[in-house]
Amino acid sequence: MKQKEKGKVTGLGGFFITSPDPEKTKKWFEENLGLPCDEYGHMFKWRDHKNPEMEGNTQFGVFEKNPEYFKPGTREYMINFRVDDLVSLIAGLKEKGMQVVGEIEEYEYGKFGWVIDPDGNKIELWEPVDQAFSEKEK
């Protein structure tokens, strides 16, 4: 029996864009598309189809133009993927000679790592702790 693969993408964690005027852009999304935004953008909440008790989220965010956070990526957007085992995934990417950016960072809401794809896009990889978001709302 084949062992379960570790370190893979499990879903979309977020999508981030840049703007010369993030507040104006967030207001546009709210007024024209009905997408209420706070200082971070908008958090879409959903339930896991295999475990409906489990709540997850996907973040939409608007950053200042040319943010350091997107570097060394070359685009004005960055995608964030949810992953199931960030440490294994980053180790595997390094073994394959991929350009991994920085070190894994850990917060109460999850671990983050970054890689550059063949087109120069900085990809954010997030191993979430979804319970951290659910507990903040209680």
Image (cartoon, rainbow, N blue to C red):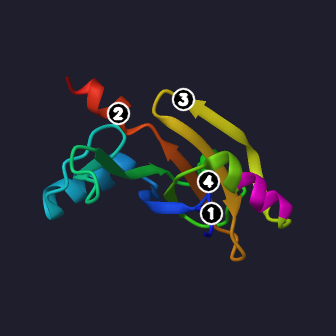
Which segment is the magenta one?
A: 90-95
Q: Residues within 10 Å of mark 4 (few under 14, many from 20)?
A: many
Q: Is residue 30 magenta?
A: no
Q: Which corner quadrant holds the N terminus?
A: bottom right
Looking at the image, is mark 2 or mark 4 nearer the viewer? 2
Q: Secondary structure at mark 1?
A: loop
What is the spatial separation of the Cα atoms under label 4 and label 3, in whole angstroms?
19 Å
Label 2 packing within 10 angstroms: few (<14), some (14-19), many (20+): some
In the image: residue 60, left or right of residue 9 = left
Work out whether mark 3 precedes mark 1 in sequence or the reverse, and give the earlier one.
1
Residue designated by label 3: 107
Where residue 47 appears, as percent x and y from the top left, is 23, 52
Mark 2 and mark 4 in contact? Answer it, CB < 8 Å: no
Distance CA(mark 3)–CA(mark 2): 13 Å
Residue flagged by tag 2: what amino acid is it?
Gln
Spatial distance from mark 1 to mark 2, Cα to Cα?
27 Å
Image side of residue 102 versus residue 20, left or right: right
Q: Quadrant of residue 29?
A: bottom left
Choose mark 4 or mark 3, whichever is in front. Answer: 3
What is the spatial separation of the Cα atoms under label 3 and label 1, in whole angstroms? Answer: 29 Å
Q: Are marks 3 and 1 in contact (CB under 8 Å)?
A: no
The answer, for residue 42, to whether it is visible in the render is no
Under mark 1, the amino acid is Gln
Indicate which disc residue 3 carries: 1
Closer to us: 47 or 124: 47
Disc assigned to residue 70: 4
Identify the mark nearer the N-term, 4 or 1: 1
Badge 3: residue crowd in 10 Å (few <14, some 14–19, many ≥20): few
Label the magenta part by its dominant secondary structure.
helix
